[in-house]
Amino acid sequence: MQALTLHAPWAWAVMHGGKDIENRSWAPPNHMLGQRIAIHAGMASLAEEREDLVRICSNVPDEFMRGAILGTVQVVGYVDEQDVGLMWNGERIEKLRSHEPAESVWFGGPVGWLLRDPKPLERPIPQRGALGLWQVKEPVLSELLKATQAA
């Protein structure tokens, strides 16, 4: 399973705060569309990021878990600043029904990965992260799969 490291407040927001768009400068690889990825909270957690999050979400904790996998989420497509339709394998397949990503508080562009069905772990798994997408390796992978199947 692949993982994506986010600053701690934004990883929390994906798992618990309704953040359904992750902004990147690049589209997710085609092989990832429809797949689940692990969301990892990196060590960075800046005060101004928490302040930004408080303006969007309620019940934001004072402290965030850092340096751990918080759960998994499905990457269902992506949008960019020019096209607010759901993209799959580089082709728009439908207009989004829930909201237009370009108008979403979560969309900052230039590309927004569309995330659905977050499955937070009961107990986050301590793990070192990496830039970009990275592979979750054993023994953490087995622990992650076991925890997500139990949820």
Image (tube, rainbow, N blue to C red):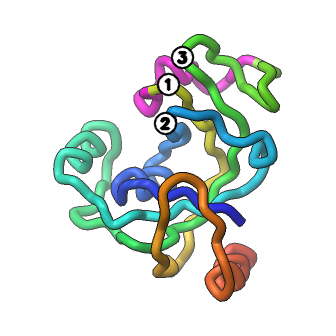
Residue at (51, 80) in percent of width and height: 125
Label 3 secondary element: loop
Q: 73 or 78, which lies in front?
A: 78
The residue at the point 65 percent across, 85 percent down is: 143
Q: Quadrant of the N terminus?
A: bottom right
Instruction: Write the start and end of the magenta stretch as one range.
Output: 95-108
Where is 69 relative to 55, above or below? below
Label placed on residue 81 = 3
Q: Residue at horizontal 40%, vertical 51%? A: 10
Compare residues 148 and 78 and report the one nearer the observer: 78
Figure quadrant of residue 41: bottom left
Q: Horizontal and vertical percent for residue 110? A: 50, 24
Measured as percent of width and height from the top left, residue 89 is found at 81, 31
Label 3 sits on what residue type? Answer: Glu
The residue type indicated by label 2 comes to Asn
Q: Earlier in the sequence, mark 2 or mark 3?
A: 2
For residue 105, say whether it is visible. yes
Disc 1 and disc 3 in contact, CB within 8 angstroms: yes
The vertical placement of 79 against 19, above or below, is above
Picture disc at residue 23: 2
Q: Which mark is residue 31?
A: none
Residue identifier under label 1: 110
Q: Is residue 58 left or right of residue 39?
A: left
Q: Are marks 2 and 3 in contact (CB under 8 Å)?
A: no
